[in-house]
Image: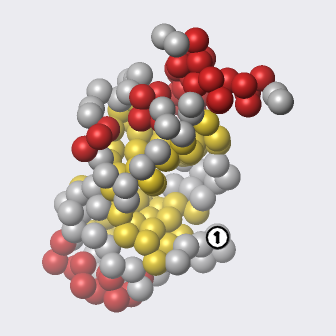
Amino acid sequence: MTTHDREFRAAGVMIEELAPLQRFSLRLRPETLPQARLALGLDLPERVGALVAAGQRRALCLGPDEWMVEWPEGDRPALPTGLPHALVDISDREITWRISGPRAAELLSIGIARDLSVLSPGKGCRTAFGTVQAVLVREGEDAFTLSVWRSFAPHVAELLAIGQRELACGL
């Protein structure tokens, strides 16, 4: 058993850095949603915080005209030429962690000043972890993904590790 395994068992929360994803920032006017949905083969949600998935494709609505779209590696979302939009590849911009276990929400509460009990599974939001802008998705009852810009990742990783150790010590 490794030190990390003992810390996980004591803290009740596992922190795992995920492999990079192919991710895009999509901005478009709400009135063009039907055309975009048809072209992408993905039902872009209209409600901020809503997440939809179709196979390996996912879209999280971050604002009235903004989505974070995850797409299968080697493929690229395509929109019609005449459709006004901005589609930017942000794959290398972010680091994502999976935070899971019975105390995952408690660990995240060290850096997120919001009641995570109101974030139901399958929903997400833009938030701040500490002072860092982040995208948080509740993947399941006891599982979250937290994405931050690569330049802030060492700071966030250290905060998560400190929080995990504090939970393990009973603080």
Q: Position of residue 107 (x, y in %)?
A: 47, 28
Q: Is residue 118 left or right of residue 19?
A: left
Q: Is residue 132 visible?
A: no
Q: What residue would you read off at disc 1?
A: 73
Looking at this rendering, what residue extends furthest in the left direction?
31
Which image quadrant for residue 50? bottom left
Q: Residue furthest right?
A: 1
Q: Nearer the viewer, residue 70 or 161?
A: 161
> Where is residue 32 shown, x and y percent of the image?
22, 79
Q: Position of residue 92 (x, y in %)?
A: 60, 51
Q: Amino acid at mark 1?
A: Glu
Q: Who's the residue at 31% across and 38% down the image? A: 116
* Residue plotted at (29% across, 40% down): 117
Position of the N terminus, as image quadrant, is: top right
Give residue 160's quadrant in the image.
Answer: top right
Mark 1 crowd level (few <14, some 14–19, many ≥20, 10 Å Cα)? few
Kindly identify the residue that appears in the image at 54 percent across and 42 percent down.
Answer: 100
Q: Is residue 46 left or right of residue 128?
A: left
Residue 114 drawn above or below residue 131: below
13 displayed left or right of 114: right
Q: Secondary structure at mark 1?
A: loop
Nearest the viewer among 150 and 10 is 10
Q: How many marks?
A: 1
Image side of residue 3 versus residue 70, left or right: right
Occupied quadrant, residue 99: top right
Compared with 146, 78 (above or below) is: below
Residue 122, how many percent across, how many down?
37, 59
